[in-house]
């Protein structure tokens, strides 16, 4: 089945926040933000802005009836800064005017005075000064201290990954409408409707029941709207509450880039020890996460870095420690992979370093150390359903790895000013929110008396195709034509207490809740039919909108059965609840079984370097991916292609840059480059790894949202391999992204320091 939104997307008819019809009396908001990285507010003069024609009001912390607090995990973030500002771009006030233009013009008239304080942008400096979001955490297995003595080879170094701008096409925004009795109806471009509802209630000082959050779809989230859609939603709700007028807040692209957090940059240290046979004996790493000025989701992101620190390898002795470092940057947040990629990059760098020193191909080290069934992850979960070695062999066979190696060697022998390189990038990614209680979901199903069906779940459609998958489930459960099923907007009054659509787990959690609701309705209808035909419900089946008895089609249609059930006063509405079984995690010992299952895969990346200019093109990326049994290959293939290209962007051209004062320099699309059609690999081939799938995944179709991003990390190591073909003295500092500028420096770097 093709994506149910495809026609309305390409004809421009899909509805996003900005397409919601505007009510009379709506005011538009422009967010006033801190122009400095750290300091105390001395005075803010709004008088000129307020005097401007068309300006209605300026909302500040003084207007907040409840708490001036929006922190999700830790209450350390104000909605509007009161006395102190902690990053450039921190919201101070919301200017409300009759038009967006007036609001933005009025913003220029506000005069602000601060006493400036020390600005820290570097996570290691923050750690040295004791500025941590939470105490450090360590995951360990075996005993690294004792293991170093057994190692034939030990390598140490550092690795850095930079942040990444989400660059969802639809910027952050919300539209709040006051209803009667102080209730607010809030449309928000958020991955977490409940988080927006809960926070708005807290700031307004009212119960959650007074705030209704509705989401039709997002023009992309990528994690950037898991927590950071909240402030704009809350500001709009606050304005509607205070002024009793509809309030619309949509961030201008440049405001969005400046004010919102991004993927966390990390600066890390590693030490890896190998045996004579090139088995990894021990691995230590210290991760410095640049959290920004408040916690946001940083503690959870940091945790996933530790979970994925050994990527797809078995290491018997591991000690990995992570620090969440508080700096004066916008609070960094969820981004596809959620800290996992940052952890994986460091062990991939360590292996590349070891391979270089040992004079072997990196893929030989990788292949020798792949995780197997029965191996323990450092966090105690025992690996099962692992197909890494088989995936590796599949890739070697399907994409003829030997021929690729030969082709690259031959090309390099023949060309002076162009060099080819390749890399292999295995991925092992855990599926489930790492915080166990978040792994629950609900779905509400109505069968209307004419036989058509309405489905509400907690899932937010952000382009990943979850609504298509939900519709498939309902249609399949009732054996209905998909056109008889409608996916409703995501709404907190229909489905409450939702987890954000995140962690790649949205289809699993909401799909299984939906299955349960449909199952209960199906049973009820079958019982009704069984009574009618004088058989047992086991004799009844639903097929092609018709009722079958003992395997034979009857003349009773689905619509007739529904009508009969309605007249018999049988409930045609059901709520399903699902909570992932098995999973648990004990933070006091950092052990448990946090993931329902893992997703595995392997990417082969080939690149051609222009050794005069430092530029490069990716010839191909060939992937063997573990879909389980994909329930929608079009949607899932799209997720792999998109994730891959987003990962390549992070590793190559997306260069986030802040100056020492905490000012974002890469603050527009002319200074921050993301992959375009020319940057996409010449060829992307995706092969399914044939498995049985797992019952923990919806219809055995494994989660696919985040894992493919990590295939993009192969780009970095492919470039390194091509670069070394030109300059064998090149020693990488493992500092991603590998921009053409860095490549050029590397091409002509000499071995002398
Ligand atoms: N795909 C599109 N088109 N747009 C998005 O915003 N977000 C990604 C991924 N794929 C995203 C996307 C992220 S960060 C996650 S966690 C998952 O989708 C969330 O959806 P899922 O749980 O249904 O996979
Ligand atoms: N992934 C994504 N989002 C999350 C997680 C996670 O593991 N935990 C909390 N929010
Ligand atoms: Mo995705 S980073 O879990 O929204």
Image (tube, grey):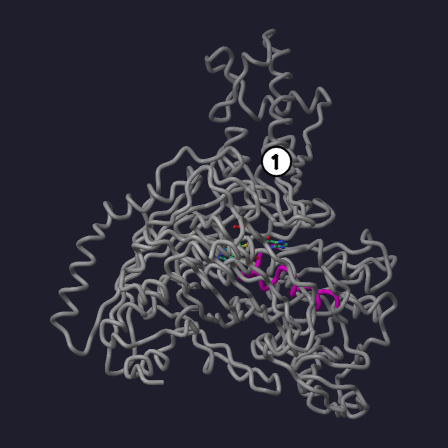
Q: Quadrant of the C terminus?
A: bottom left
Tell me the residue at 30%/76% (across/down): 730
The mark total stands at 1
The one of 643 and 626 positioned closer to us in this rendering: 626
Q: Is residue 190 above or below residue 617?
A: above
Q: Point out the quarter of the image occupied by ligand 2.
A: bottom right
Which residue reaches farthest left? 414
Circle 1 SS class: loop
| Residue 25 image-quadrant placement | bottom right
The one of 46 and 542 positioned closer to us in this rendering: 46
Q: Residues within 10 Å of mark 1 (few under 14, many from 20)?
A: few
| Residue 441 image-quadrant placement | top right
Q: Which residue is mark 1?
A: 582
Q: Give, as a single range, the part of the protein colored magenta.
A: 216-234
Q: Quadrant of the N terminus?
A: top left
Percent position (x, y) of residue 346? 46, 63
The one of 349 and 80 positioned closer to us in this rendering: 349
Residue 119 at least partly seen? yes
């Amino acid at each position: 089945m093709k994506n149910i939104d495809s026609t309305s997307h390409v004809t421009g008819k899909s509805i996003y926040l900005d397409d919601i019809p505007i009510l009379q009396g709506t005011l538009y908001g422009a967010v006033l933000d801190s122009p400095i990285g750290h300091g105390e507010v001395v005075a803010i003069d709004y008088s000129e802005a307020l005097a401007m024609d068309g300006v209605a009001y300026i909302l500040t912390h003084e207007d907040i009836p409840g708490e001036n607090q929006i922190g999700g995990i830790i209450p350390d973030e104000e909605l509007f800064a009161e006395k102190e500002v902690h990053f450039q771009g921190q919201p101070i006030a919301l200017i409300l005017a009759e038009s967006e233009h007036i609001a933005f013009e009025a913003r220029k008239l506000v005069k602000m005075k601060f006493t400036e304080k020390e600005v820290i942008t570097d996570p290691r400096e923050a750690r040295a000064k004791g500025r941590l979001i939470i105490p450090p955490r360590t995951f360990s297995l075996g005993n690294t201290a004792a293991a170093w003595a057994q190692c034939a080879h030990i390598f140490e170094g550092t690795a850095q990954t930079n942040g990444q701008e989400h660059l969802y096409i639809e910027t952050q925004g919300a539209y709040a409408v006051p209803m009667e009795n102080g209730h607010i109806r809030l449309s928000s471009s958020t991955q977490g409707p409940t988080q927006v509802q809960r926070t708005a209630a807290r700031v307004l000082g009212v119960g959650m029941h007074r705030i209704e959050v509705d989401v039709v779809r997002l023009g992309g989230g990528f994690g950037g709207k898991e927590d950071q859609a909240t402030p704009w939603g809350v500001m709009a709700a606050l304005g509607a509450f205070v002024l009793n007028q509809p309030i619309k807040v949509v961030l201008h692209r440049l405001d969005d880039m400046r004010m919102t957090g991004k993927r966390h940059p990390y600066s890390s240290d590693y030490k890896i020890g190998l045996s004579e046979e090139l088995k990894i004996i021990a691995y230590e790493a210290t991760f410095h996460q640049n959290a920004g000025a408040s916690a946001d989701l940083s503690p959870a992101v940091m945790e996933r870095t530790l979970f994925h620190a050994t990527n797809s390898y078995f290491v018997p002795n591991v000690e990995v420690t992570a620090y969440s470092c508080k700096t004066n940057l916008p609070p960094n947040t969820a981004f596809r992979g959620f800290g996992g990629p940052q952890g994986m990059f460091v062990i991939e760098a360590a292996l590349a370093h070891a391979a270089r020193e040992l004079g072997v191909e990196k893929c030989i080290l990788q292949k020798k150390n792949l995780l197997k069934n029965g191996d323990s992850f450092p966090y105690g979960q025992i690996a099962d359903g692992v197909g890494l070695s088989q995936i590796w062999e599949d890739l070697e066979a399907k994409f003829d790895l030997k021929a690729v190696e030969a082709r690259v060697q031959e090309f390099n022998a023949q060309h002076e000013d162009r060099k080819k390189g390749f890399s292999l990038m295995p991925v092992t990614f855990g599926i489930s929110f790492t915080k166990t209680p978040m792994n629950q979901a609900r779905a509400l199903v109505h069968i209307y008396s004419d036989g058509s069906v309405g489905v509400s779940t907690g899932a937010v459609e952000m382009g990943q195709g979850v609504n298509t998958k939900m519709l498939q489930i309902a249609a399949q459960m009732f054996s209905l034509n998909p056109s008889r099923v409608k996916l409703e907007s995501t709404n907190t009054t229909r489905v409450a207490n939702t987890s954000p659509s995140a962690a790649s787990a949205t289809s699993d959690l909401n799909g299984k809740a939906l299955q349960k609701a449909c199952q209960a309705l199906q049973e009820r209808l079958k019982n009704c039919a069984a009574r009618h035909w004088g058989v047992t419900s086991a004799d009844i089946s639903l097929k092609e909108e018709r009722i079958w008895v003992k395997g034979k089609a009857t003349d009773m249609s689905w619509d007739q059965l529904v009508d009969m059930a309605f007249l018999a006063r049988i409930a045609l509405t059901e709520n399903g609840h699902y909570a992932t079984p098995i999973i648990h995690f004990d933070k006091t010992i950092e052990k448990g079984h946090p993931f329902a299952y893992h997703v595995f895969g392997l990417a082969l990346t080939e690149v051609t370097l222009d050794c005069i200019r430092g530029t490069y093109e990716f010839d191909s990326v060939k992937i063997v991916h573990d879909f389980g049994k994909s329930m929608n290959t079009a949607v899932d293939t799209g997720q792999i292609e998109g994730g891959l290209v987003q990962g390549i962007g992070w590793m190559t051209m997306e260069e986030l840059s802040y100056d020492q004062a905490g000012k974002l320099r890469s603050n527009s699309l002319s200074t921050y480059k993301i992959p375009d059609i020319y940057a996409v690999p010449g060829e992307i081939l995706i092969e399914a790894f044939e498995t049985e799938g797992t019952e923990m995944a919806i219809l055995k179709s494994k989660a696919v949202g985040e894992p493919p991003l990590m295939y993009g990390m192969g780009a970095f190591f492919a470039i390194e391999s091509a670069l070394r073909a030109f300059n064998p003295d090149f020693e990488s500092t493992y500092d991603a992204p590998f921009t053409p500028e860095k490549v050029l420096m590397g091409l002509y770097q000499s071995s002398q320091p």
